[in-house]
Amino acid sequence: MVTNPAKALMFQGTGSDVGKSLLVAGLARAFTLRGLKVLPFKPQNMSNNAAVTADGGEIGRAQALQARAAKVPLSVHMNPVLLKPQSEVGAQIVVQGKVRGNAKAAEYQHIKAGLMPAVLESFEHLKAQADLVLVEGAGSASEVNLRRNDIANMGFARAADVPVVLIGDIDRGGVIASLAGTKTVLDPDDAAMILGFIVNRFRGDPSLFDEGMRMIEGFTGWRPIGLLPHFPEASRLPAEDALALNSKPAAKPGAKIRIAVPILPHVSNFDDLDPLDAEPDVELIRVRPGGVLPADADLVLLLGSKVTISDLQALKAAGFDIDIAAHVRRGKPVLGLCGGYQMLGKSVVDPDGIEGPAGAVEPGLGLLDVETRLTGDKRLVAVQGKTTDGISFAGYEMHVGETEGVDCARAFAVIEDRTEGAQSKSGLVAGTYVHGLFADDAQRSAWLKKLGGEASRLDYEQGVEEVLDRLAAHMERHLDLDLLLTLAR
């Protein structure tokens, strides 16, 4: 029997992308540095950016970053319901780390009430191990049209009796109305769960919004926790959702290496780009359908996909297959990661409709002599090994499907006692199921040299740790953390 269960506090937003994930990560590190054992929790997440957990499942990438901030191992209980959008079949439903099935949006509204027991079970599991559980809501607290059967916001807060702090984003404008309006539209019993508010992403002189903070308090009756200035270094932390792909990257006029990345409709695990983005000598050129892959690119990088066949069809429809073939004819390399690896082969078949309607794409890009068959078994595992040029790496695999063919005899890597991936006879085209490859400094450095640059001077993982520490200090300076602990129960 747990005699001293953890305190808990939930952070909901007036809308999507108001900074909930980053704020929870910063608070997780700040309270951890104060000596508390902190665990992050998100009842329901929707993201195709996922991480492999120590207990053999998967959770949203945001909860993985929050766990890292709290200096604890990843657990499936930190994100018991993960929705991974897929094309015609809707979203894949992952419950406590394992695939439960697929559902379209309307169907899921009826299914989710039945997932509340698993959500509460995971929450109780974390409470038994922590001093403080920081809970992140999903989307907007004011989506009252979806309140029935809700498990992500007020539905969870009420069921678990967890007090709420509401976050508004001043950067998008209308923050007074969005916070006060949320109080207006919520059911009174739901609104009573909110005890405080935070105004996020402020720029400029904070004294200019003193009256604004007082007005929000007057309209809502909630206690002000703080006015949180914009944190520019957030871009150096792994991003959770595809909104990050829409942001314009900082210019790198001195970059020596150009890497072209087709951005397809169902791109997944795009945090594989983050370590490359951190390199001052690397310019990442993200190209969406309608654009052209630049002829002077040093590397074409194909990312993972949640729906490989659909994205391969989108790639061809955009004419990227022509650009990639021309790139190879110019003697330039191509690397495919996970779904990108599958696309490089001669065919991708999905006879059982694992990722969408049963079907196949034949031919594929045909740059590797391999064929992929999608299967129902999902491989989720952390891996360590060496590429066949002898460079070590650490990463993870997260995929369905088996890839076989002649080019697998020219493996990309050796992992323990098995070979993995494939390379073309020319050596220009390679594919691997390993994610996180470029987060390994030795592996990233080897690629930079291979592409004509210099060895990396970055310790990428240490850089992430330093940013998390500075984010925690940012929270300590601008938010009333003692008040947050008082509000938690």
Image (tube, rainbow, N blue to C red):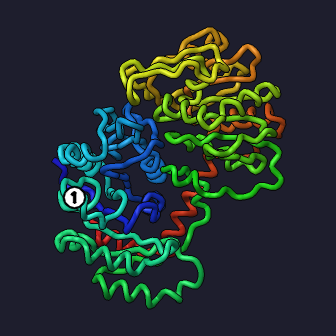
**Quarter of image, res 164:** bottom left
Question: Does 302 sit above or below residue 412?
Answer: below
Q: Mark 1 belongs to which amino acid?
A: Gly
Residue 228 seen? no
Camera-side residue: 226 or 152?
Answer: 152
Decide if residue 179 is on the left or right side of residue 335.
left
The residue located at (34%, 52%) in the rendering is 42
Q: Is residue 392 left or right of residue 131?
A: right
Number of marks: 1
Q: Position of residue 168 (x, y in %)?
A: 42, 72
Judging depth in this view, the residue of 466 and 116 nearest the camera is: 116
Residue at screen point 55% across, 30% down: 312
Q: Residue at x 32, y 33 (%)?
A: 98
Tell me the crowding category of disc 1: few under 14, some 14 to 19, or many 20 or more residues within 10 angstroms, Cα based: some
Is 126 on the left-hand or right-hand side of 319? left
User: Does the rendering let one see residue 42?
Assistant: yes
Q: Residue at x 79, y 29 (%)?
A: 332
What x and y, as percent, mark residue 275? 65, 45
Q: Tell me residue 349's x, y (percent).
A: 47, 19
Which residue, given by chain and number where applicable, does mark 1 sit on? Answer: 155
Image position, residue 320 (x, y; %)? 66, 35
Where 226 sits versus 214, above or below? Answer: above
Q: Quadrant of residue 18?
A: bottom left
Vertical placement of residue 487 versus 100, above or below: below
Q: Residue furthest bottom?
A: 211
The quadrant of the picture occupied by the C terminus is: bottom left
* Label 1: which secondary element: helix
